[in-house]
């Protein structure tokens, strides 16, 4: 992937995203849409996975058939909202290894603080796809990527649903080697760090909390 930012403008993605943004969409509806959209985003973020061929037999003849070249994948969910994207991704890539990174924002310093980190052992040998629906300030995403790099990851992509220009700029500064795939680039962050127009708090909307 050569571009730093890819916006997936497929009509199905855009339609489902609009339904997710609507404030009247129920928790169950939001979760279902997120699962469906994550399949479509997974398709895009894995578009350039290398292929090889293997000889197979169809009912008619032998053929040299394309198969994935054995490149191993790791999905890393940035808690807690990342889990919503993770579920759909695992439907499509069931053999992927999975890691979790938990960060919260210190109210005084406003810096991300790690409270959980469990990553697959051989990250350096894998294509790592970090998932978090909302790329807002980019501070926690950049910190999560730091942890993945400390654990040996060298080939990382960041998959989100919505990005704010501020978050994209922060990620570009901290991790210019990490391509970002998103369904939309929104207008801005508000004073509370929410993406505008956005969809609200992704975790609250998917888990029904407030
Ligand atoms: N996290 C969210 O869940 N929503 C935002 O708008 C920003 C960060």
Image (tube, rainbow, N blue to C red):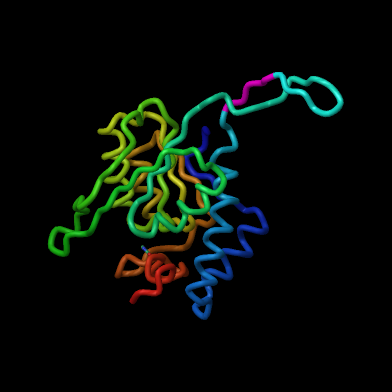
Residue 175 percent across, percent down from the top left: 35, 38
Residue 98 % position (x, y): 39, 42
Residue at image coords 73%, 22% = 56
Is the C terminus in the top left, top right, bottom left or bottom right quadrant? bottom left
Left or right of 165 on screen, residue 42: right
Question: Is 27 included in the stretch rendered in magenta?
Answer: no
Considering only vertical position in the picture, is 31 above or below 53? below
Q: How far across and how far down the image is residue 137, in percent?
A: 33, 56
Q: Is residue 68 above or below residue 188?
A: above
Q: Quadrant of ligand 1?
A: bottom left
Q: Is 91 situated left or right of 129 in this image? A: right
Res 59 → quadrant: top right
Outermost residue, front side? 59
Measuring 66% from the left and 59% from the top, which residue is drawn there? Answer: 12
Identify the residue at image location x=53%, y=76%.
Answer: 25
Q: Nearer the viewer, residue 152 or 158?
A: 152
Q: Nearer the viewer, residue 17 or 4?
A: 17
Q: Residue furthest right?
A: 60
156, 138: nearer the viewer: 156
Using the image as rendered, state which of residue 33 and residue 120 is in the foreground: 120
Up/down of 150 relative to 190, above or below: above
Would residue 48 appear left or right of 121 to someone viewing this image? Answer: right
Secondary structure mostly seen in magenta is strand
Q: Residue furthest left?
A: 108
Question: What residue sits 27% from the left and 46% below the top?
Answer: 143
Which stretch is magenta?
50-54
**Spot occupied by residue 49 in the image (x, y as percentages of width and height):** 56, 31
């Amino acid at each position: 992937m050569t571009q730093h930012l890819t916006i997936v403008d497929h009509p199905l993605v855009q339609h489902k995203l609009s339904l997710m943004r609507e404030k009247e969409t129920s928790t169950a509806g939001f979760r279902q849409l997120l699962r469906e959209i994550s399949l479509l985003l997974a398709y895009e973020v894995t578009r350039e996975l290398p292929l090889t061929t293997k000889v197979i037999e169809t009912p008619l003849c032998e053929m040299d058939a394309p198969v994935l070249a054995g490149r191993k994948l790791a999905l890393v969910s940035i808690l807690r909202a990342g889990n919503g994207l993770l579920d759909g991704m695992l439907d499509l890539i069931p053999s992927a290894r999975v890691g979790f990174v938990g960060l919260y924002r210190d109210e005084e310093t406003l810096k991300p603080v790690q409270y959980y980190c469990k990553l697959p052992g051989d990250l350096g040998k894998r294509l790592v796809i970090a998932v978090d629906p909302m790329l807002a300030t980019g501070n926690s995403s950049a910190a999560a990527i730091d942890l993945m790099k400390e654990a040996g990851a060298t080939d990382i992509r960041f998959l989100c649903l919505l990005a704010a220009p501020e978050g994209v700029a922060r990620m570009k500064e901290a991790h210019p080697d990490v391509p970002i795939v998103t369904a939309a680039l929104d207008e801005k962050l508000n004073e509370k760090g929410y993406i505008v127009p956005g969809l609200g708090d992704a975790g609250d909307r998917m888990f029904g909390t407030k």
